Image (cartoon, grey):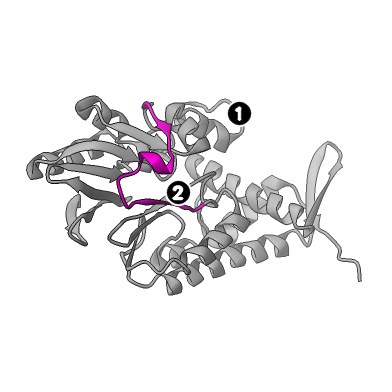
Amino acid sequence: MYELIQLTENDYYIDCPAKIGLVRTGPDEAVLIDSGNDKDAGKKVLRILDSKGWNLKAIYNTHSHADHIGGNRYLQEKTGCRIFAKGMERLYTVRPLLEPAGLYGGLPFRELRNKFLMAQESIAEELTEDVLPEGMKILELPGHSFEMTGFLTKDNTAYIADCVSSEETLSKYGIGYLWNPEESVKTLEYIKTLGAARFVPSHAPVTEDITGLADFNIRAVTGVRNAVAKLISEPMTFEEILEKVFDEYGLAMTVQQYVLIGSTVKSYLSSMYQQGEAEYSFEGNRMIWTVKEQKV
């Protein structure tokens, strides 16, 4: 774990729970794509950089989830590196309390203020093409998170963050966190067209052909959507839907799973409502979801 893997002359990744991209930008300079899940991850990353004699110039965050920005603060304090993230991702990086608050939908209680859902604050600037190293491009990859980005290097390596999960993870759990299922599917279709020489997902093996894994993820998203639609063929509240989703996928309810899967189920319901596939009503001060009858 935390082994530096070389892909090309300049492109590397650090093998850890959420892979960290590393791109050399000069004989003694490097930039990171994400920073790991906490201060300890930052320490391990810095040891790798020091062992190579590389100075850290910048961190480019793909999105604001804690396992991707958790090392930001430590590395910034130790090296003075600049940190860049896009739009909403930058706001959440600067104010990480927004993450558990958004997932919970209110003031997050103490069990939600942990390193898995809430990183330490760091100073982040807006991500634009002109702050990237020469030859690197931004990949727009929304769906898993608000404005998630990936990066394509001059050596044609695509760092694609969390737009795919591994087949192993999806086969085991069936459902994973998504902010926008519809945008996620569009992103999965998009990465199949990139033609990169290699793809580095954060939570799946590095591969030269992303098509099969992208299609596997598309089927998983479609499967969850179909499962939710089947459940609300009988009118029910969100809490009832969530209980049945946990039963359907064999999940164990915890505080963390409640907010992550709960937020995901709400996103599926919103997407289905926007597409005219679901509707809601209020009965006895309860919000009821059901499938929308299609007119012939």
Q: How many marks?
A: 2
Horizontally, residue 264 falls left or right of residue 55, namely: right
Observer-nearest of 180 and 268: 180
Q: Earlier in the sequence, mark 2 or mark 1?
A: 1
Query: Label 2 sits on what residue type?
Result: Thr
Q: Residue at x 38, y 36 (%)?
A: 84
x%, y% of residue 106? 60, 28
Q: Residue at x 55, y 52 (%)?
A: 143
Span shown in magenta: 122-141
x%, y% of residue 24? 20, 48
- Quadrant into which the C terminus falls: bottom right
Location of mark 1 (residue) = 106
The residue tagged with tag 1: helix, strand or loop?
Answer: loop
Horizontally, residue 91 falls left or right of residue 268, namely: left
Q: Is residue 228 magenta?
A: no
Horizontally, residue 222 falls left or right of residue 171, namely: right
Task: Give the quadrant of residue 205.
Answer: bottom left
**Could one spot residue 235 in this view of the protein?**
no
The residue tagged with tag 2: helix, strand or loop?
Answer: strand
Location of mark 2 (residue) = 149
Specify the label residue 8 is tagged with: none
Disc nearest the viewer among 2 and 1: 2
x%, y% of residue 111? 46, 31
Q: Is residue 133 magenta?
A: yes
Crowding at label 1, few (<14), some or many (≥20) Cα neighbours within 10 Å?
few
Task: Give the quadrant of residue 278.
Answer: bottom right
Observer-nearest of 171 and 57: 57
Query: Label 1 sits on what residue type?
Result: Gly
Residue 211's place in the image compared with 225, above or below, is: below
Q: Are marks 2 and 1 in contact (CB under 8 Å)?
A: no
x%, y% of residue 177? 52, 51
